[in-house]
Amino acid sequence: MTGSLLVHAIVPRSRANGPGERMTVWVQGCTLACGGCFNPGTHPGGEAATSVAELLAMAEALPIEGVTLTGGEPLQQAEGVAAFGAGLKARTGLGLIILTGYSRREIEDDPARLAAVAHADLVVAGRYQRLAHLGGGLRGSSNKAYWWLTGRYRGVELEALPDLEVLVGADGTLTITGMAAPTIG
């Protein structure tokens, strides 16, 4: 499988980024500049690319239900996302969810973006809006829309997702993920 993605981080097994345990990939790079974005570290571009073949091998080796691509902005790497989605569907039975700041119309109006979501089961689409923050499910804000491309997932599964997840790595590093901002106090 050819192609690559600029990757910010990978969590091999998460329960807060879609139904079931899933590999979550945060891509590096986003120019949308949504006010209040809670992943600003993913905005600058990057130079070190991870091959689609390597990402597929990682997903195949894990006991997971699916993969979630988020960011940064996955659809600003449309060619790599399209190759990953096609490979995932051809080689595995894993589900694919893509979280994007682009609206459904912006995706449908752009052939490269449309090809990038062609193998997804669910696309969560729309710019993040801080004043409409939800803190739960996969929609960071209430204006974001679920675009169901297959019947693999249901809304009730998304409502049951934990709002926040804290993962402790083997080396003791903490990863906090989910749609709710952690509070200390």
Image: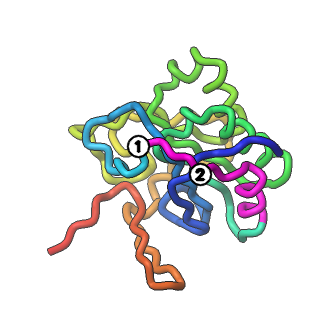
- Amino acid on which disc 1 is placed: His
Q: Earlier in the sequence, mark 1 or mark 2?
A: 1
Q: Position of residue 181 (x, y in %)?
A: 28, 59
Specify whether 91 is left or right of 82: right
Q: Position of residue 82 (x, y in %)?
A: 70, 36
Specify whether 56 is left or right of 110: right
**Which residue is outermost to the top?**
109
Residue 1 versus residue 127 in the image, above or below = below
Residue at the disc numbered 2:
48
The part of the chain drawn in magenta is: 43-60
Q: How many marks?
A: 2
Q: Nearer the viewer, residue 32 or 158?
A: 32
Residue at the disc numbered 1:
43
Figure quadrant of residue 19: bottom right
Specify whether 97 is left or right of 118: left
Q: Nearer the viewer, residue 53 or 86?
A: 53
